[in-house]
Amino acid sequence: MKDSKNPIQVILYEGSGTTPISSGDRLALTANLLDQGYSVSRVSQNASPGKNQAASAIIVLGQFSEAAPEIMDASGKTRIETRDTTGLNHESILEQVEEARESLDAEQNQPGANGAWKPWFPVIDYDRCTNCMQCLSFCLFDVYGVDDEKQIQVQNNDNCKTNCPACSRVCPEVAIMFPKYTSGPINGEPVRQQDVERESMKVDITALLGGDIYSSLKTRSEKAKSRFSKERSPDKALDERKRCMIKLQQSGIIPPEVLAELDLESLPSAEAIQQKAKEMAALQNKQG
Amino acid sequence: MSDSTDKILYCRCAFSQVVPVKTKEEVLEKLCDSGRDFECVSDLCEMSARRDDRLGELLEGDGKVKIAACYPRAVKWLFHQAGIPFPEDGSVEVLNMREDTAETISKGLLDE
């Protein structure tokens, strides 16, 4: 993962031996912590033990009647800090949390921070997916792969271009979602019959471009390779990729702003595209 | 009916503001006022992207799990993508803060 920091778990402990915090402070505290990337649990005496085993760092907050207890994880996997918040308002408690986080030497992804990473990646609806491999064929960035049973899966989230829902648009079954997308059905809305019909039309449009987008790319890459070998000019190869991207732009499948941000030189080489074509053909033969 | 063994999970969608702010604020307010225990996460998508093991813990429990997040189809497959099987036996209910009102969501979560 590009950024694999686990959220720090904050537990608002309001069980025995504590005074419950006011609902206003609970709300302000919870909202602020979530907006900073923390996970928050509110726990009263009804809580069952043994939870939060997957958390690597926990901060326990409570208005303790006596001194804040020292809590240890017997397995030693989870680091825990406890803070008594008696008499503190939510701003002061947030300062306590920050101080505890520093003590734990724990980091986490922060929403909205400068250069913040956005969780943008395709999510496959396997109730709809027919394993046709259109997405794998189409994506130039190796986001997709197959598992041991040749089932399509998302393997490289980080390769996905933020705000690009192109693979979702070429999926004939409307089986690919981007939950952070603004509109349906790409955002996960229920799929209607008209969505399926519209997606089928898009596939027909790509067919008009020359087989499908991938074939179009492949053909163009082959032509480019031929010319490239004759002319031995890197500029020519780059120009070819640019022309290919313009064609994609005209198809309307990839958003212009995403295309504009693409570093053309980072696109796969003609050889890489051809290698992918061979692998795809082999896969489809096995399935067939 | 909801009871105290039901687990409540709230997703803040903090990494991208696709859930209406008013809805998620009002739902969280009702949750904090209710006196019920809850689990809140900053962003389920962010956790799924990292294949966070905590996602599995969030679905564990003796009772029903109620999730206030976004489209049920997206939530179901986000868990799946993180390697967490999503129960199909009705033990998990997803409430959609992108489409439904805060009142509807809160009622669904808390059975007010």
Image: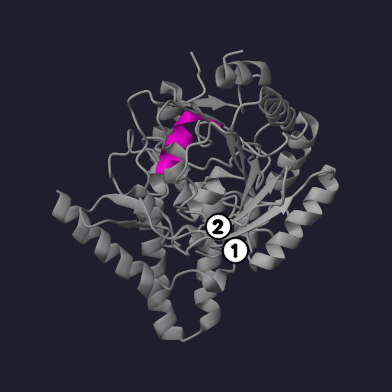
**Considering the numbered disc 2 on the image, is that residue within a helix, a strand or a loop?**
loop
Residue B37 occupies quadrant: top right
Q: Which residue is mark 1?
A: A262
Residue A205 at x, y percent in the picture: 43, 40
Residue B17 occupies quadrant: top right
| Disc 1 residue type (three-letter) | Leu
Residue A161, numbered label: 2
Residue drawn at point x = 41 percent, y = 22 percent = A193
Is residue B78 on the magenta stretch?
A: yes
**CA distance for labels 1 and 2:** 8 Å
Residue drawn at point x = 47 percent, y = 57 percent = A157
Q: Nearer the viewer, residue A227 or A252?
A: A252
Q: Are marks 1 and 2 on the same chain?
A: yes
Direction front: furthest residue = A66
Q: Are marks 1 and 2 in contact (CB under 8 Å)?
A: yes
Is residue B38 on the magenta stretch?
A: no
Task: Establish if A49 lies above or below A256.
Answer: above
Direction bottom: furthest residue = A232
B51 lies left or right of B83: right
Which segment is the magenta one? B69-79
